[in-house]
Image (spheres, rainbow, N blue to C red):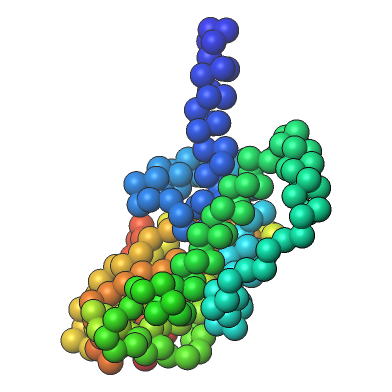
């Protein structure tokens, strides 16, 4: 090993230093997500960082339409004396070593919040036209098919083009990191028996993941939604509809 090898290793690790929040909030591209999941299998530090942030999606999932009523009115102008104090606080925060990580989480949360607003009130943003979506209106608990520490619920929203499925998947007890990472996938089973894998993610012990995916099937064409091991194909959880 040369004197430069530790520096090269550190540079490689630093590439993923701010990816944890984006991964938890689903902001990475498909290619970046696969790259980061491969890195998580060998990096205990990053797995720990992801587990620490895993509670954020669960909190954001509780946001309801009433929380976005503020979009209907213009924000009030802040008092003149607020600006100097705010600038002082910003300067102080910039001197803190974890400012970048905090800013990344805030930005990703804001992006996700806007995404939730678009889904819940798309007409506010001029996104949706035609027939409004039809939602199942409740969280549906998935049933265990195999022995597994994983628990999950799903919610479904129907559109003219198909169905969106949102899942909340918890791997073991929150904060307990006593199991290895596991490659997981969401599978949709049609009334005709067809099976389509529509999402994959890396399950981390003690963490909650919120995978979402779309299928061209209408809600009444779906017989079941399954959570499977993407490596073996074993069905772990299932919700029949």
Which residue sits at x=77%, y=55%? 80
In this rendering, the answer to whether 30 lies above or below 58 is above
Which residue sits at x=37%, y=90%? 134
Which residue sits at x=36%, y=74%? 126
User: Is 96 on the left-hand or right-hand side of 134?
Assistant: right
In this rendering, the answer to whether 1 lies above or below 216 is above
Which residue is at the far front?
Answer: 80
Which image quarter: residue 204? Answer: bottom right
In this rendering, the answer to whether 72 lies above or below 31 is below
Q: Is residue 236 visible?
A: no
The front one of 160 and 184 is 160
Q: Position of residue 201 (x, y in %)?
A: 43, 58
* Quadrant, the C terminus: bottom left
Which residue sits at x=72%, y=61%? 78
Q: Is residue 201 visible?
A: yes
Which image quarter: residue 87? Answer: top right
The front one of 211 and 21 is 21
User: Is 55 on the left-hand or right-hand side of 37?
Assistant: right
In this rendering, the count of numbered labels is 0
Q: Position of residue 177 (x, y in %)?
A: 65, 55
Q: Position of residue 100 (x, y in %)?
A: 63, 40
User: Is 150 on the left-hand or right-hand side of 157?
Assistant: right
């Amino acid at each position: 090993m040369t004197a430069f090898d530790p520096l090269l290793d550190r540079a490689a690790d630093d590439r993923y230093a701010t990816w944890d929040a984006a991964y938890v909030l689903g902001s990475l591209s498909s290619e970046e997500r696969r790259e980061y999941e491969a890195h998580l299998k060998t990096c205990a530090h990053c797995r720990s960082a992801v587990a620490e942030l895993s509670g954020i999606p669960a909190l954001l999932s509780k946001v309801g339409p009433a929380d976005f009523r503020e979009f209907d009115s213009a924000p009030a102008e802040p008092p003149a004396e607020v600006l100097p104090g705010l600038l002082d606080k910003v300067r102080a925060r910039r001197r803190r070593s974890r400012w970048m990580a905090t800013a990344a989480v805030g930005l990703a949360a804001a992006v996700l919040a806007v995404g939730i607003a678009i889904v819940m009130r798309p007409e506010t943003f001029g996104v949706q036209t035609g027939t409004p979506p039809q939602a199942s209106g409740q969280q549906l608990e998935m049933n265990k098919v195999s022995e597994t520490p994983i628990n999950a619920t799903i919610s479904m929203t129907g559109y003219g083009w198909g169905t969106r499925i949102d899942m909340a998947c918890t791997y073991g007890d929150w904060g307990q990191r006593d199991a290895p990472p596991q490659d997981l996938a969401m599978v949709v089973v049609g009334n005709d028996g067809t099976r389509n894998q529509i999402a994959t993610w890396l399950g981390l012990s003690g963490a909650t993941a919120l995978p979402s995916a779309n299928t061209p099937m209408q809600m009444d064409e779906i017989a079941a939604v399954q959570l499977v091991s993407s490596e073996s194909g074993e069905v772990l959880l299932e919700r029949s509809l």
